[in-house]
Amino acid sequence: MDAEEREAFCIVERGQRRLALPASAVRRVLSGGTLTPLPCAPAHVVGLVSDRGAPLPVVCVDPWIDEPVRACRSGEPVLVLECGGLRFGVIVDRVGGVGWLPAHETGAADPSAPAPVVSAARPADGGPVSVIDPVALAAAVVAAADAAFAGDGAPRAA
């Protein structure tokens, strides 16, 4: 396959899932930062970290990737994403590096995911990965925040 037909992805792990996010949406990885809780924040917003001196909201993607929601702690790696007009962090368990996947391949939506954020697993070096659409994730984060302030705080499909 030619280099023009491949796209760079940041490969990460969260729970039992290997995930890939387009490298074009990932600005940097923060590690070892202090996660400051936000009072009255929606459940999926786990706090703020300092990103080069600026506050960065950090979200837990577990509800959107079909992983049991678990506590997020200071010191866990945070991917800084910029997409859909938003800048926010996503907490992960491990950053595996950059990998290459075929460009513009669209897998069928993962039916087990509560929102159209993650694609079905597809082959990659090191094992299958599910690709996260960062724009859909940004939209889902905003929709869940809107729902939380209007109702019970549970993330909902966009």
Image (tube, rainbow, N blue to C red):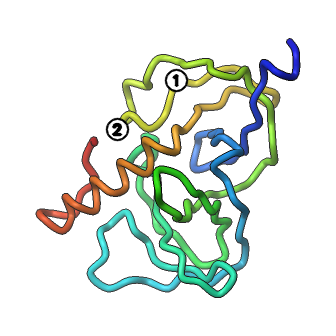
Q: Where does the image place residue 85, in percent across and percent down from the top left?
A: 47, 56
The residue singled out by tag 2 in the image is: 115
Q: Where does the image place residue 78, in percent across and percent down from the top left?
A: 63, 65
Q: What is the distance, in whole Å, between disc 1 and disc 2 at their CAs?
A: 12 Å
Which residue occupies the foreground of this view, 116 or 7? 7
Query: Which quadrant holds residue 125?
Result: top right
**Relative to 130, residue 38 above or below:** below
Q: In percent of the image, x 32 and y 85: which residue is there? A: 39
Q: Where does the image place residue 70, in percent across and percent down from the top left?
A: 45, 61
The quadrant of the image that shows the N terminus is top right
The quadrant of the image that shows the C terminus is top left
Q: In percent of the image, x 52 and y 45: which residue is there? A: 134
Give the mark, 1 or 2, whose residue is nearer the N terminus.
2
In the image as oriented, which residue stretches furthest toward the top?
1
Q: In percent of the image, x 65 and y 31: which residue is there? A: 129
**Res. 120 mark:** 1
Q: Type of residue at label 1?
A: Ala
